[in-house]
Amino acid sequence: MLEVRGVSRRFGGLEALVGVDLVAQAGQVVAVIGPNGSGKTTLLNVISGVLTPDAGTVRWEGRDITGWPPHRVAHLGIGRTFQRPRIMETMTVRENIGLGFLFRARGLPVPQAMAMAQEVGEEVGLGDRLDVPAGDLTYIDQKRLELARALAGDPRLLLLDEWLAGLTEGELQVGLELLRRLRAQGKAVVLVEHVMSAVRAIADRVVVLHAGRKILEGEPEEVLKHPEVVATYLGQDTGC
Amino acid sequence: MLRVFGLTVLYRKHRALQDVHLELHPEETVAVIGANGAGKSTLLQAIAGLVRPQPGARIEYEGKSVLGWSPERLARAGVVLVPEGRELFTGMTVYENLLLGAHGVRDRSTVHRRLEWVYTLFPRLRERHGQVAGTLSGGEQQMLAIARGLMARPRLLLLDEPSLGLAPLIVREVFQVLQRIQAEGCAILLAEQNVRMSLRVAQRGYVLETGRVVRHGTAAELERDELVQRAYLGA
Amino acid sequence: MAGSGTWVAVLLDGLILGGVYALIALGLNLQYAVAMILNLAYGELVMLGALLTYTLYTAGRLSPLVSLLAVAVVAGGVSAAAYLAGLRRVFRMDRREAEVAMLLLTFALLFLLQSSALMLWGAELRHYTFWGEPVFLLGHPFSTNRLVAAAGAFLLSGALYGILRWSSLGRVLRGMADNPRAAQLVGVEVERYRLVAFGIGGMLAGASGTLLSMFWSFSPTAGIDVTVRALVVIVLGGIGSVVGSLTAGLLLGVAESVVSAVWDPALRLTVNFAVLTGILLWRPRGLFGWRT
Amino acid sequence: MADVRERGESIAWAAYFLGMLVLLTAPRWGSAYLVGFCVELLSYMALVTAWTMFSGPTRYFSLATAAFFGIGTYVTVYLGGRIPVLACVAVAAALAYLVASVVGLATLRLSGLYFVMFTFGLSEFLRQFVLWFEGRLFRKVGRIVSVPFSDLDLYYALWGITAVLLLSAFLLRRSRLGYALRAIGEDELAAAHAGVNVSRVKIGVFAATASAMAVVGAILAPRWAYVLPDMAFDPTRSFQVVLMAMLGGIRHSYGPLLGTIPLLLLYEWLYARYPYPFMFVLGLLLAVLILYAPGGVSGMMEGILQRAEERRQEAMRIRAEELGHVESGEG
């Protein structure tokens, strides 16, 4: 179980996060939504160890991991994907996925890691392109590859940063199906997302951020109809 | 004033923009709306010369083709981009940021006249003129970014997500200023998530969804259009 | 060694040396902060300036103060040529390749300049006497050339600081150092200004060479020592910070003169390096600013 | 396409190991001059291999080869007579490991820029420090090396360290550590999120390769009758190692060694007669390589091999179509 309490972080004059709380249970998909610049990615950076918060704590499975470096956070079973996919372009797809198996808490020897990559590759739909250099993949496939690398680390919590963005209707359904399978396996998922249809379809709970503050939390239906949320997205007509 | 034909932009083999057509008449404000990741920023960056479009695109500004022009050449020709994330000179004062906005203007009195004009539009910047830009609040930084753009007396202002991370009160102030800017003869192409505010300020609008223009019409038409609602809230 | 008098002398000597170090670091900082090129061959440009001054003085009977400008222009020209010939291409590479390519190109430039200097002037140590007579400052003897060199260094540093602080050219250069993308968006022809900044940096190197040559002995292979000191100064002062370079230059000048007075002049670079290692371990961003 | 690379790589490595066997027997049949050249060749093969093991995959370019080599040299110079040679080598390795760890701690957590700057200054710093140390301790600079270490022992010791380095470079390619280094070179943040302890790997491997360089320095020390700090810490040694690696091409594990032999031949032939013009040519060569052939010789070779492969597959496809056409025609 992930528990984020009162996390704040500023960059010079800008308050990126102010006193944000977030809880994600095993087998639960928590969507984090909010317009651009509301601090969503900063929140993931604090959880995954890229940034140390100015205030507040991050607890995972009962342990305080505030400020831990990314590799130790990864070893606790927390996987991460990024808004712009960060993949090893000169390595093949198999080798990219193999990195997860190699460097997770109980890392596997190289041959075994590369063999295990096959199965995870197929699970995300890259089974037929395992020996292609990752640099040749399209943007969408690179996002899938990143998820596969995270899954190889045997995570119990997944932090996905706009993983469903830019998908066609068909691709979206495949992606949602995959997330449902991961939830069924008992994994917790924190989904930073803009594709509202996906949030509506998969999220168990929705957290709304605006200008670094959590302004609402609740069931998807209830939250997405809430006037204040509609306002932050469609904008208030505060007269002009 | 501005005509864009067949604009396609690839990002890592992914079609960020797909065959976009767009027009802008002098002294007109046009809004480009769409969910995040729909390609709004890419469109503005392509027009401002920061991103290279695929062959076959045509971008005409005041009748001339400006395809392939560098951002600095476009800025000097009056096409000024206020980018997403503002790109201020964070280590320099408000005053210096504004002076740099008028880079290339030799005549000092013109620069000072523009400075006065900008200070009247954004009174708070006059108060903060000696302060280092990085220490301003989010709203003030956004105002400074727009003000710096205006110092070049643009004929076409490209505004990328001005309401980014701003509290509603400040968003209203920013949009009021946009109206006054347009009234003084500057065409504005506004890429914005905040649909209702942008349709309030704009005369016409284009709706982008995963890189394609899915709807185009006057502000009034778009406001009632259920597609716009769906594009945002997946109703 | 004690006695207040001698400490004053050590302090003054340190400030004189520090002034020249600050000037050298300013040129390197200008090239890096604005033209975004960390020039590992910077010391070679300083040596070029020193050697040219030496030849003009010994062969052409031209006093260093007169030849200062000419030498600076030549060094600036060499820098501009190097920039146009190859360094310019670095900006078309993707970011990660560019940083490595930039450093390796200046590393290659180092050996190009050093070997050319060796071919022209040979490897022996050079020295010339110019205004050697002592002048008494606060009761302590200082050779005139040291004072003149320090005065020249402070003058040039002051001039550069003034240009950067108050002139419009300076504002543009500072803008490019602060945010190159923003400079482009306000219409600054970044390509041209990078060349200008790299050229001015080269001129400062040449000028520093002339000033140094007045009281130091030098050879074509002594460039690396100068570059290393300049690197220590800009890291200590915070890369890209003009004030930082000036202050750090003076600090190091004093530290070195204390060490050479108390222990041994040969230990001067050791002090620099010990200070650099300490700073990087303790406060990686340098004292005054940060920009990487 | 991948098999073209595999085949190219295995052929190259096979050639290297064969070459090493030949070099092992060189002292028996080679002339004194040839053995001298082989010693030079072995030492640069070792230095280039050690340098590339760290700088190749991670793109952190160290300019400190000369510094670590110099450390090794001076350990033998000072301790050579007093303790057995193997102990010298061990002390050299340990000292270099320590120095490299401090350099790594100070710079590797920052951008690559600080690292390159620091390593650039390191050999100059050590050169001046030893200059001062010798002046202080022995009143005069320059030491005569008297070590009970025959030329033959030296040759075989050098051959040994080079073989060890080649073998570890070969094994590193497909090893866990090799993948960690490549991942760090591609994207440090992603590597960290995959579980790689980025700082520890960077500092550890940099220090290990640094001690290997010191071992080479320690072994070679007896060859100089008379040692001066300027010779042991000569910055051109760092320059040549980088140039050899870039000429050979650092994108392939077998690349760098390709650059070693041609440059060494050039060095032997030209350096003695016209040292300065030769250095100028080397500087120019490095600049040209970086600008126009970053992939180096191995990069170009692979390009040619790949194009040949494409043409071959193209030809096969056309022939297959003709056959297909003929069959359907008959069917």
Image (cartoon, grey):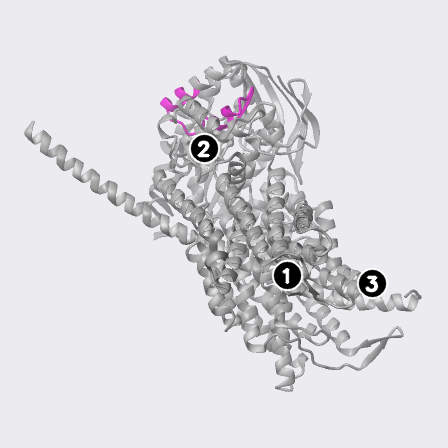
Quick one: label 2, few (<14), some, or many (20+) residues within 10 Å? many
Q: Do the numbered discs 1 and 3 sit on residues whose CB atoms are within 8 Å?
A: no
Q: Do the numbered discs 3 and 2 sit on residues whose CB atoms are within 8 Å?
A: no
Find residue A20 and report its horizontal and vertical position in percent. 65, 25
Find residue C2 and report its horizontal and vertical position in percent. 92, 64
> Is A156 inside the magenta-drawn segment?
yes
At horizontal 72% and vertical 64% (from top left) the residue drawn is: D131
Q: Residue under mark 3: which chain is it in?
A: C
Q: Is residue C167 left or right of residue A132?
A: right
At horizontal 34% and vertical 52% (from top left) the residue drawn is: B63
Q: Residue under mark 1: which chain is it in?
A: D
Q: Nearer the viewer, mark 2 or mark 1?
A: 1
Quick one: label 3, few (<14), some, or many (20+) residues within 10 Å? few
Find residue D23 and report its horizontal and vertical position in percent. 47, 53
Residue matched to label 3: C263
Indicate the amino acid at tag 3.
Answer: Trp
Residue matched to label 1: D232
Q: Judge whether C59 appears above or below D7 on screen.
A: below
Quadrant placement of the C terminus of chain A: top right
Residue matched to label 2: A95
At horizontal 53% and vertical 59% (from top left) the residue drawn is: D40
* Image quadrant where residue A127 sits: top left
For mark 2, give the secondary structure.
helix
Indicate the amino acid at tag 1.
Answer: Ala
Per the rendered image, the range of residues in magenta is A147-176
